[in-house]
Image (spheres, rainbow, N blue to C red):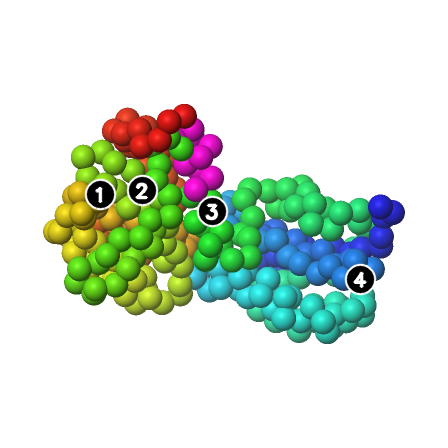
Amino acid sequence: MKPAQGYYCLIQYCPDLSRLEAANIGVLLFCPDRMFLQARTARDNRRIRHFFGPEDHDWAQINSFKRGIEERLEVEHRNIQSLEDLQRFIQLRANQIQITAPRPMRVLNPSEDLDQLFQDLVGGTPRKQGDEGRPFRRYVGDCISNAGLDSKIARDLSVHVPISNECLKVPYGYQNGRFNLIQPVTFQSQEPSYAIGKACRFAVEGRSLYSEPHPEYGDLQLVVVGRFLSQPTDTSTDVRRILTEHQVQLYTEDSISKLIDEIRRTGKVLQPD
């Protein structure tokens, strides 16, 4: 495949527009010949903390801005067909998240080139489109599979929740005296009430599952693996309290290694290697 003409822009956080000091938090790649327009933004905010310190930042708003740029580009894809269109889009950015002027580059594989740009200019782990949904479930599954735990893991389970008389579908489970139902859940939102409401729902279901043995799996326990906003003070403490009071275990994304260690140490083999 022959290289095509493309353009890349840095996505930057600039807390004081008058000083023009900025931290790279993402990168955008536009290749009109390949009909490609996407951005990669950082999942966390380490570079902002490194350059500007941890205080006086609205982390929820920053994460919302990053997510919004990626989503907006997807919506505007059909309207951005030329370099001039992209420049007009950039000029409309008036908040603390800025996009630099496009710089030319040769593009061979747009998606791979964008990933490489992100690693070279931003570093760390990118926030992928749909991090709030199924990709997080795949991420948890990949962590389990990469740890060599497939023989101890049951997949694609459906259990009856007595209190609601509904079926709860969970992607993974393991047995260690209780049958643990592993449910990846995203709690990312600017509104704390969103995470609290979600926690209450899983708390009620978890208590019901814990209190009534399953005819096939026996005693049950719900295990939530949660993804939260990357900010110094989030809602994970409140969520943990609510879940723990109702016999639901919580592992955050950052502590998933502890869950893997627990499965490796106490999980029973369910299927041959």
State the residue in front, 245 or 172. 172
Q: Where is mark 1, residue-wise?
A: 217
Looking at the rendered structure, the kind of residue marked 4 is Pro
Report, in whole angstroms, how far the alpha carbon at label 2 lies from the one at label 4: 45 Å
Report, in whole angstroms, how far the alpha carbon at label 3 lies from the one at label 4: 31 Å
Q: Of helix, strand and loop, which one carries label 3?
A: helix
Q: Quadrant of residue 92?
A: bottom right
Q: Where is mark 2, residue-wise?
A: 173
Residue lying at 26% horizontally and 53% vertically, measured from the top left:
159
Residue 45 shows in the view:
no
Residue 120: percent from the left, percent from the top?
A: 67, 41
State the residue in front, 36 or 167. 167
Q: Where is mark 3, residue-wise?
A: 138
User: Callout 3 environment at 10 Å: few (<14), some (14 to 19), or many (20+)?
Assistant: few
Residue 258: percent from the left, percent from the top?
A: 32, 34
- Circle 2 or circle 4, nearest the eye: 2
Q: Is residue 196 magenta?
A: no
Q: Where is mark 4, residue-wise?
A: 32
Report, in whole angstroms, how far the alpha carbon at label 3 lies from the one at label 2: 14 Å
